[in-house]
Every structure is written in structure tokens, then in C-alpha cells.
């Protein structure tokens, strides 16, 4: 072929040096001012009046109660939503049934509904003037302005996280392996634990981590259903708001540093899981790497 007949390839997007540097610079500026700067301020302000005040705020009974209540909500909401996410993903990707699309839409609702709206809705369901309020009151069952309300609200806002991570992956994997397992006589539970779960475990752990982080940082829905009673029904985010309203900015930043540390550990766990998952994929696609 003649050199005169060759055509010059069109430049790819981002080939221009000025464009590439400008784009990267914009990203770094936004990251610095929107993400890094607030985190740095939290650390600086938390220790602005010394280690002693920081320590006194962290070990204060109200702070410890808020931390324990936040952990309790996570210990209940995360496992329940994990089971729900696995069941929903399994049903949607492995079976055909009426209402499948509707179930997908319902799972997405907590992402589109404001948490405060969800909290107000719970008032009309479990409140004294709500749908089940009179019956609950007659049987001396307290949902709102108590721990059960906090847990239910936390479950609502975090319901989609595990399912959202599993459904795309399980759809991409298809049903061939499960059908082969059942054709060989394996039960549904054995097929799940031997075939499905090992193939989705990294996505499952990733969803659990995101769900846990969301539970611990939830504010809107919990603030409505808990009553925000100091030392009784306030979680850690609500406790930070109370400290700020008490003009105790240093104490608020000290309590906020706990949530910031949780966020940092969440990111570390997320990156570690992504590297583990990427490593497994490389080993599966490159058999020579297994023996190296």
C-alpha cells in the first residue's frame, strides 16, 4: 500500500497536552477544596484546644452512648440488609417471575426518596396518629422516638446497597453455572454456597462496607424518628449536631473526627477489596500468574 494512501488517525480525546493538564488540574482543585480541606479542618479543630478536651469529649457518657447506639443500629441493619440484598439479587437474576421489574423499582426507592421524607412517612405509619400507632400504643410497643425507629430508618436508607452491588454482577455471570450445578443434583442451598457465593463474594463485601458506612453516617431519617433525645436516642451524627447547637464547636469536631476515621477505614477497606478482586480476576484470566 502506498504511503500516500494512508490516512492519519484522528486524535483521541485528551491527547492535547493543555487539555489533559487542565482537566487533571480541575480535578485536583475540586478534590482539595471539596474533600480534603473539610477533613483537614475536622482534624485541626478537634485538637485546637488540646488533647485533654478531645479526650474528655470522646469519653463523655453522651458521646459513648451515641457511639454505642450507632454501632447497635449498624449491627442490626447491615446483616438484615445483607440478607435482603442477597435474596433480592438471587431472585431477580436467577428467576423469571411476575413483578420482577416492579421489584427492581422498589429497591431503588431509598436512593430517590429524601431520608427526611422517609422519616416523616414513618411518623404516619408508626406514630400515635399513624396507621399502626393506636394498636402499638394499646400494646405498649414503642417504635418511634426509641431504638426500633432508629433501626428501621437505618434499614430503609441502606436497603439498596448490597443488592445494587450484586445484581449487575450476577446478571453478567448468567445462570449457566447454577443450572449445571442443579442438573448434577445439587440442592439450591448447596448451589448458592458452592457456586454463586464464591463468584460474588467481593462485590458482596463491598456492598456490606458501603452499607455499614451509610448506616453510621445517616442523619435525616434518624433525626425525624428518634426525637434526638440527648443520651437516649441520639446517634453519633445527631450528637454532633447537639454539640454544635450548644456552641461547643471543638466538641462537635472531636465527635465528627470519629465519623471521619470511620470514613477513612471504609475507604481503606474498599481499596483493599478492589485490589483483592482485581488480583483474583488476573489470576483467573492469566493461568501463568498462578504458578508464579
Image (cartoon, rainbow, N blue to C red):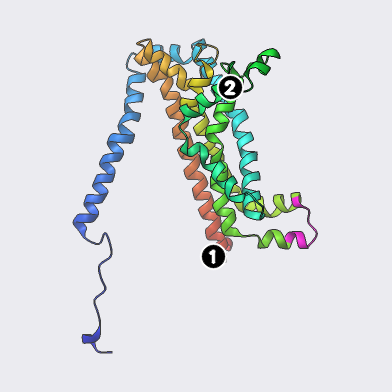
Q: Nearer the viewer, mark 2 or mark 1?
A: 2
- The quadrant in which residue 173 appears is bottom right
- Relative to 61, residue 206 above or below: below
| Residue 281: % across, % down | 54, 58
In this rendering, position of residue 51 left or right of residue 71: left
- The quadrant in which residue 126 appears is top right
The disc at residue 149 is: 2
Task: Determine the residue located farthest toward the bottom in the rendered image.
Answer: 1
SS state under label 1: loop
Screen quadrant of the C terminus: bottom right
| Residue 253: % across, % down | 38, 20
Query: Residue 182: within the magenta?
Result: yes
Q: CA distance from mark 2 to mark 1?
A: 50 Å
| Residue 221: % across, % down | 49, 26
Task: Please rate how many residues cluster around mark 2, counting C-alpha atoms within 10 Å: few if below 14, some from 14 to 19, many from 20.
Answer: many
The disc at residue 286 is: 1
In this rendering, position of residue 180 left or right of residue 200: right
Front in this rendered view, residue 287 or 257: 257
The disc at residue 54 is: none
Q: Residue at x 45, y 24 (%)?
A: 258
Front in this rendered view, residue 147 or 43: 147
Query: Residue 281: within the magenta?
Result: no
- Relative to 152, residue 178 above or below: below
- Visible in this render: residue 292? no
Tell me where the magenta segment starts and ends, as one range: 181-188
- Relative to 22, residue 36 above or below: above
The earlier-in-sequence mark between 2 and 1 is 2
| Residue 222: % across, % down | 51, 23
In this rendering, position of residue 175 left or right of residue 27: right
Q: Residue at x 55, y 40 (%)?
A: 160
Q: Residue at x 58, y 56 (%)?
A: 171
Amino acid at each position: 500500500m502506498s504511503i500516500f494512501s494512508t490516512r492519519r488517525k484522528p486524535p483521541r480525546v485528551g491527547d492535547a497536552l493543555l487539555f489533559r493538564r487542565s482537566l487533571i488540574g480541575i480535578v485536583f482543585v475540586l478534590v482539595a477544596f471539596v474533600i480534603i480541606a473539610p477533613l483537614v479542618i475536622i482534624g485541626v479543630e478537634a485538637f485546637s484546644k488540646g488533647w485533654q478536651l478531645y479526650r474528655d469529649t470522646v469519653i463523655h457518657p453522651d458521646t459513648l452512648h451515641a457511639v454505642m447506639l450507632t454501632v447497635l443500629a449498624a449491627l442490626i441493619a447491615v446483616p438484615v440488609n445483607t440478607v435482603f440484598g442477597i435474596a433480592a439479587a438471587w431472585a431477580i437474576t436467577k428467576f423469571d417471575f411476575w413483578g420482577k421489574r416492579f421489584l427492581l423499582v422498589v429497591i431503588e426507592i431509598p436512593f430517590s426518596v429524601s431520608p427526611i421524607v422517609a422519616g416523616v412517612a414513618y411518623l404516619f405509619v408508626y406514630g400515635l396518629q399513624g396507621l399502626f400507632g393506636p394498636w402499638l400504643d394499646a400494646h405498649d410497643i414503642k417504635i418511634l422516638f426509641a431504638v426500633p425507629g432508629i433501626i428501621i430508618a437505618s434499614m430503609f436508607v441502606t436497603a439498596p446497597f448490597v443488592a445494587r452491588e450484586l445484581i449487575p454482577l450476577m446478571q453478567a455471570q448468567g445462570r449457566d453455572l447454577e443450572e449445571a450445578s442443579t442438573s448434577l443434583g445439587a440442592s439450591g442451598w448447596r448451589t448458592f454456597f458452592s457456586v454463586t457465593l464464591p463468584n460474588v463474594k467481593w462485590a458482596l463485601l463491598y456492598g456490606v462496607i458501603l452499607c455499614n458506612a451509610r448506616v453510621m453516617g445517616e442523619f435525616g431519617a434518624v433525626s425525624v424518628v428518634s426525637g434526638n433525645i440527648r443520651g437516649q436516642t441520639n446517634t453519633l451524627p445527631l450528637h454532633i449536631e447537639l454539640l454544635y447547637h450548644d456552641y461547643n464547636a471543638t466538641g462537635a469536631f472531636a465527635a465528627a473526627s470519629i465519623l471521619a476515621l470511620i470514613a477513612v477505614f471504609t475507604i481503606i477497606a474498599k481499596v483493599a477489596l478492589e485490589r483483592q478482586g482485581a488480583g483474583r480476576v488476573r489470576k483467573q484470566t492469566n493461568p501463568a500468574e498462578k504458578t508464579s
